Image (cartoon, rainbow, N blue to C red):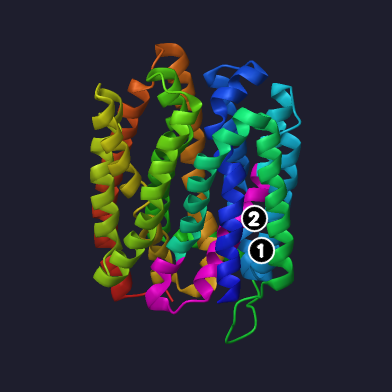
Amino acid sequence: MRTAALVVLCQFVHWFTYAAIPLFLPLILKDLQINFTQAGMLSAAGTLAYALGQIPAGYLADRYGPRRPFFFGLLGWSVLSVAFGLIHVFWLALLNQFAAGLFRALLFAPGLTLLASWFPPGRRATAMSLYMLGGFAGSVVLSLVGPFLASVYGWRAAFIFFAVLGIGAAFLYKIRAKEPPRPQPLPHFSLLGVLGLTRYPIMWLCSGLQFVRFSVFTAFNFWLPSLLVADRGFSVQAAGLVVAMSAAFMAPSITIGGYVSDRLRNPPLVIGGALTVLACTSTLLVALESIPLMLIVIMVNSVFVQFYFGPLFIVPLEVLGQRYAGTATGFANLFANLGAVIAAYSLGVVKDRAGTFTWGFIGISAVCLVGVALAVVLARMRRRALASPAE
């Protein structure tokens, strides 16, 4: 279990730099002299590269084991984060984020696979949620400490400091982490075998839901600080406190969602229920004028925005088994991040064109309703698939 704890620790430290970009975005906008559309392009560039790297990262985890890809992913991301703190030109920042996204792709599927492999099958949705629990715990710490460090030393020095912590965590992981226990040698994988995943309809359905999941999460996670500062007049420090509150509610909810799914043995119910709540909160977030009511909506939204993370990732493993765990995770997360690219860029464009984030978040509500419909279909498809498993 030491390796599982190290994976969570690395995710905790990695989130310092990942979450620092949206938190410091109002400062980055002024420093690089860019608009909201260009800020959206920064997120979209990193997310696009991250999306393109999902299937290769999952394939590497299944073919060679997840330990080494995870190490190189954290190290590469952290080194490029140091470089981002030194860049003063927008196009260089764009290239940096694209390259960093490729390395970050090596963190997700290998890390999730490595963490889940140390738990029995009946607890894997809960185990997968621990991966994101580490990240959001890091976000809480960052949101409390980051604005203070940025106000004293500047956002660049604070960002580089967090990146250096990531480099240290990567080498600690390399020294102490182990490959998961395996009852048999690693199977031989071919790319044709990977492409065979596309013949399972449930993979496409889960990928559609992943598209919805990360579109909603990115809209909320990346643009919330800017919405608070630009549309509601918050200071960066006050926005940081709200983001810390949001992350504090989000962190335990991921594990609770995985636990509820494991106990009910009904992931689609958890997925559809969470998306129903998010369809309401996404509109209320920009419709309410009262700041106290808006903060309540942010709290509710934070509870459910990743509540169904573990349940959604566990469904393909239920049907396909552990053999393609990394590749199936990468395949689904490719579509998740394509959704994130669109959400990150389009909400920036909407803000520049309309002068407000309102219509962007109303659009996110519509996306959630599509997800509810997909969850209903998933429930039926999953029942049939488990009745006659693929392999």
Residue 371 or residue 253, whichever sits in front: 253
29 left or right of 93 in image = left
Residue placed at 75% from the left, 46% from the top? 79
Considering only vertical position in the picture, is 306 above or below 222? below
User: Main structural element of the magenta stretch: helix, strand or loop?
Assistant: helix
Q: Position of residue 172 (x, y in %)?
A: 71, 64
Mark 1 residue element: helix
- Which range is magenta? 101-127
Q: Quadrant of the N terminus?
A: bottom right
Residue 35 shows in this picture: yes
Residue placed at 54% from the left, 43% from the top? 142
Q: Quadrant of residue 93?
A: top right
Q: Which mark is residue 381?
A: none
Which comes before the other along the chain, label 1 or label 2? 1
Q: Amino acid at mark 1?
A: Leu
Q: Quadrant of the C terminus?
A: bottom left
Residue placed at 50% from the left, 41% from the top? 144
Q: Within the magenta stretch, is there residue 209? A: no
Residue placed at 37% from the left, 74% from the top? 389
Q: Position of residue 129 (x, y in %)?
A: 43, 61
**Residue labelled with disc 1:** 60
73 left or right of 25 in image = right
Considering only vertical position in the picture, is 130 above or below 41? below
Q: Position of residue 386 (x, y in %)?
A: 31, 73
Residues under numbered marks 1 and 2 in contact, where contact means CB atoms less than 8 Å apart: yes
**Residue labelled with disc 2:** 106
Considering only vertical position in the picture, is 88 above or below 162? above
